[in-house]
Image: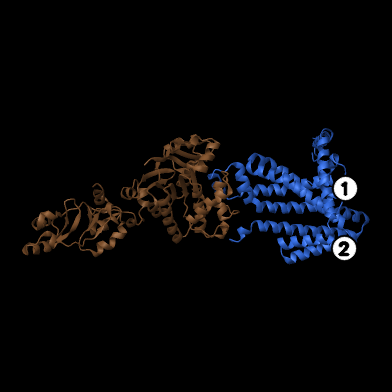
Amino acid sequence: MTEFPEVRIPIGDVVENFIDFLAMNFEAFFDFIFVISSSMIKGLEAGLLAIPWWIFIIIIFLLGWYFTNLYGGLLFGLFIFLIGTFDLWPETMTTISIVLISVILSLVIGIPLGVGTAFSKTMSTIMRPVLDAMQTMPSFVYLIPVIFFFPLGNVPAVIATIIYALPPVIRLTELGIRNVDKEVVESAQSFGSSTSQMLMKVQLPQALPTIMAGVNQTTMMALSMAVVGSMVGAQGLGERVLYAINRIDISLGFEAGISIVFLAIIIDRITGGIANRLQKHRRDAA
Amino acid sequence: MTVKLKVENVSKIFGPRPKKVIPMIEKGVPKDEILAKTGHTVGVYNASMEIMEGETFVIMGLSGSGKSTLIRCLNLLNKPTYGAIYVDGENVVGYNKNQLKYFRQKKIAMVFQHFGLFSHRTVLENIEYGLEIRAMSKTERREIAQKHLETVGLKGYENQYPDELSGGMRQRVGIARALANDPDILLMDEPFSALDPLIRREMQLELLDIQNKLQKTIIFITHDVNEAFKIGDRVAVMKDGKVEQIGTPEEILEKPASNYISEFIRDIDRSKILQAEHIMSKPYGLVSLKDGLNVAIQVMRESGISSAFVTDRKRQLQGIVTVDQAIDGLKEKKTLQEVMSTEVKTVQPDEYVQDIIPYVLDSKYPIVVTDEEQTIKGIILRVHVLASLISESNNEQNDAQKL
């Protein structure tokens, strides 16, 4: 009686069959996604690589200066310079492209979903366990079906990254909109705003600082997927880390790893700075 | 005056099945018990009132009395569970989405207790919001917003953000934003409650000023009796979601409908609400100029008083004569006109008791209440003033009102 009876409920098989079904019948759809996202990544990558290294450093310096402070700018410039000395410049540009495209797509998908969950209680109830699953399911698990739909490379990495990085932006968009002051919403209503005017002119702008916190989270999570993404063929710094693991090359592993950390710090501080700036007029009162 | 807004048997009950609780309310079960037993909150029950065009109508009650729920029914932020609300004769409760939008954009605007300002927009952008959403061109709405910004005395603050302003200034933005829409009806939900007392008094006076100029129909919510009686042409007192009494401040002061209201108005400064005409008594001891001194002395003897007011044929005040002056005058063979003194303290019927008190203290004689043509309306003795300040003794004043 200590052993579990031999009952088999084959949920795994069902999922597998479903994935097979999708791969067979929606080939055109997945091809379409593949073409779009791979050309977006390629375009951005080519664009970044076309920028001379010193101009890129200056741009990062200026962004850092504007959104944080002078020392931030100098530090970020130095980080990029160091990455250059590691001889990881093209890999870094590839990683930035993959991360940026993942984040942009996450926002395009996530913000409307967040708005939807804020407005509909049913949708919120349905979304909650889905988001929990997306956040806790080990990312390797959904790497498997993703490579069913797309050839190995950057695209499955972007898809996996989106799945992993999407929840914070949905959650914080919902939270931001729900937390808009009740009287502010009432006052917008009392002037006869339509639902879309209310959303665009009042609720989204009021929720923006919270949404930006979500964007920041999403970006950081996307970056942390760089190495996992390389397991399905993504190029860039993650691929260098994998290569170093296989070779037990401590030096390369550290350099590629610390480059990812540098990118993370720069992106975190700059998006954080944007978020702060957006609520500047609020902090002044405090 | 025409009825601008008519509230007819409006009830607002929060909860899934409001029908169930109606019999309980009718039986007089208290609100908390209904909430505990059924999970329904009774916001407003069976409220009816008529609000006139250009009137400042105050709804007063303690927190939880349903006053905020009721005012939100008027612009349908709360849809009434039962009842009808007529604005210019149209029942707005039945409005569809578009009619409601139009109604809110054009006819009715609201000012909120905590201002309800948009913190991401500048002062000017806040004020023009109502115009922006009805797609008015930018130059036009800027101009209107600027005008109203100046009306409320915020010139120079156009590009500040609300959080950079003080509480009083923020509420000015709230008022300007509501006025910019040029609504017929202005709803004000405890607009000055969040402000400190000095600013509050200033804002009250400014509101009265603005109202004098614009003549909107204002519905004003407050829990402060003094504020209610100062601002309101008429006042409705609410308790536990029901309207207890509606009347002018004087009516409520003189004839409170229930012990609750008596209790509510006990601390009020009556001298700031009652006016000369409410406390004066019927003029007596009047003599006409043509009657002469003999008649004057006789009148004074009959009424047992030592002075009499002298009038002409149209009852216009000419002067005062004391019994001593009259007797001396008789001896010296003078006329009434020659002996009387023309220095009589007069007040207008609408002068507040608090302003009359010093005159009463200074004068040996009664104060005369006259209208603009100097016609005598009544007289005020010290005893009238004192009696008016004490709430329970209202018989004498009621006599005065019956005149």
Instruction: Read off the chain for label 2.
Output: A
Could you tell me which residue is drawn at 61 percent across and 58 percent down? A281
Place of residue B62 in the rendered image (x, y in percent of width and height, measured from the top left):
44, 50
The residue to which callout 1 is attached is A233
Is residue A224 shown left or right of residue B204? right
Place of residue B246 in the rendered image (x, y in percent of width and height, measured from the top left):
37, 44
**Which quadrant of the view contains residue A61?**
bottom right
Label 1 secondary element: loop
Question: Identity of the amino acid at label 2?
Answer: Thr
Q: Residue furthest bottom?
A: A71
Place of residue A93 in the rendered image (x, y in percent of width and height, measured from the top left):
84, 54
Question: Identity of the amino acid at label 1?
Answer: Gly
Residue A198 visible within the image: yes
Residue B302 visible within the image: no
Q: Distance between the residues labelled 2 and 1?
A: 25 Å
Q: In this view, does A162 lie above or below B321?
A: above
Is residue B369 shown left or right of residue B22? left
Label 2 secondary element: helix
Identify by letter the chain in brown.
B
Tell me which numbered mark, 2 or 1, is placed earlier along the sequence: 2
Q: In this view, does B345 lie above or below A104?
A: below
